Amino acid sequence: MKVTIKKLPKSEIEIEGEIETDKFESYFKKALKKIGEILELDGFRKGKIPESVLLSKVPEIRILEEMAEMALGEHYPKIIEDEKIDAIGRPEISITKLARKNPLGFKIKTAVLLEIKLPDYKKIAKKIIADITDAEKNHVVSDEDVENTIMDIRKSRAPKKHMADATPPREGEAPSPSEKAGDEVKEELPEFNDAFVQALGPFKDVTDFKAKLKENIKLEKENQNREKTRLKIVEGMIDESVVELPELLVGIELDKILYRMESDIAQMGLKFEDYLKHLNKTKEDLRKEFRTDAEKKAKLALILNEIAKMEKIIPDPEQVAKEVVAILEQYKEADPERAKMHAENVLTNEKIFQFLENL
């Protein structure tokens, strides 16, 4: 197989080549079998459809597309390895020639990792951590913090009663302002006692609840301060690093941002298209708005990846396996391999920050 490699702007390359006819043709029966395993056809059990029937029912273009996917899935990693290409991100693949008894022509565009000039990330982390004040280190939880949180919990558990549902005024009597509103809500706070806290969880009484609540508020403050510290370390590393960002990676981060936004809007029971109309914006407008955020995320990913390599930081395999199980339980349709990659990435990043925080 011959390939040519062309350098593109912004740390990208284009690989163009052909898989020879005989090699490409060898995927025909494999592709047909794979299609047959998922095809549903009246009168046949799934996976038990004869080859002759498949050939008569499945369009040739579908078989060719499956052949191309299988062939490139096997050969792309070999090309990357043979040509010593340090590829990152998901490649963009386009087929230039697709026909029986012919070579498979293709073009692959992918981002490549160029040299990253990292700052003295240890020095940055040490300075930021040294600047943490005693007040920030000592997470004091006041009685007022506890009482405010208790009030929030009581309000969240208060039964709601619409004033519109109240007894209407007698004939000739003017309704009160609240009755006119119709959508006013009256809150009757539940009494804060042992029975109330026992209904919330495994608490003995009010004293036990307050003690555990105080500890939880303290942990929350610690987490908030840790996140603030990590954000400062991130900003410091990004500002002082020299990284040529591949456009492909920026695009991937933009896709993630928009996907999360669409998911959040969908959970609110709204259509994303309606949301965009309300804003009087297009998806392309949002991509422009979020570009700076996407560039920061892409840059940080490259920086953390480089630190992990330099410091030989890898996640614990058992933790990765547990995380994958949790992801697949929550997202039934998730691809196991992608779930594993996500888990490895998250756990590696966590270990990097722990390393920087404990220098």
Image (cartoon, rainbow, N blue to C red):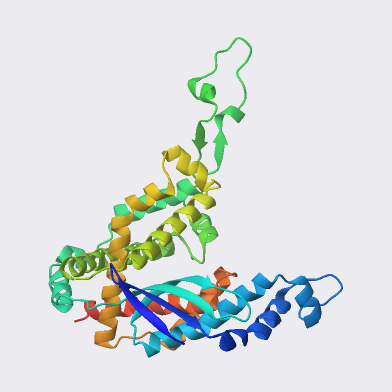
Question: Is 120 in front, or is 255?
Answer: 255
Residue 130 position in % (x across, y down) = 13, 72
Q: Is residue 49 visible?
A: no
Give the side of residue 67 with respect to residue 203, left or right.
Answer: right
In depth, the one of 207 and 11 nearer the eye is 11
For residue 71, what is the image quadrant?
A: bottom right
Q: Which residue is drawn at the image coordinates 29% and 74% (left, top)?
A: 302
Q: Please identify the residue farthest to the right as the structure is shown.
A: 43
Quarter residue 21 falls in: bottom right
Q: Residue furthest front?
A: 102
Residue 342: x %, y % from top left: 44, 75
Please state which of residues 177 and 64 is positioned toward the viewer in this rendering: 64
Question: Left or right: where does residue 8 sit relative to residue 24?
Answer: left
Total marks shown come to 0
The percent position of residue 136, horizontal first and vertical second, equals: 20, 64
Q: Residue sitting at 28 percent across and 65 percent down? A: 227
Placement of 68 over or under 144, stated as above or below? below
Quadrant in the picture for residue 87: bottom left
- Decide: is 174 above or below 35: above
* Residue 327 against residue 147 in the figure, above or below: below
* Residue sitting farthest toward the top: 172
Task: Name which residue lies at 39% across and 84% down.
Answer: 80
Q: Is residue 113 visible?
A: yes
- In the image, taking residue 63 as reference, residue 47 lies left or right, namely right
Quadrant location of the C terminus?
bottom left
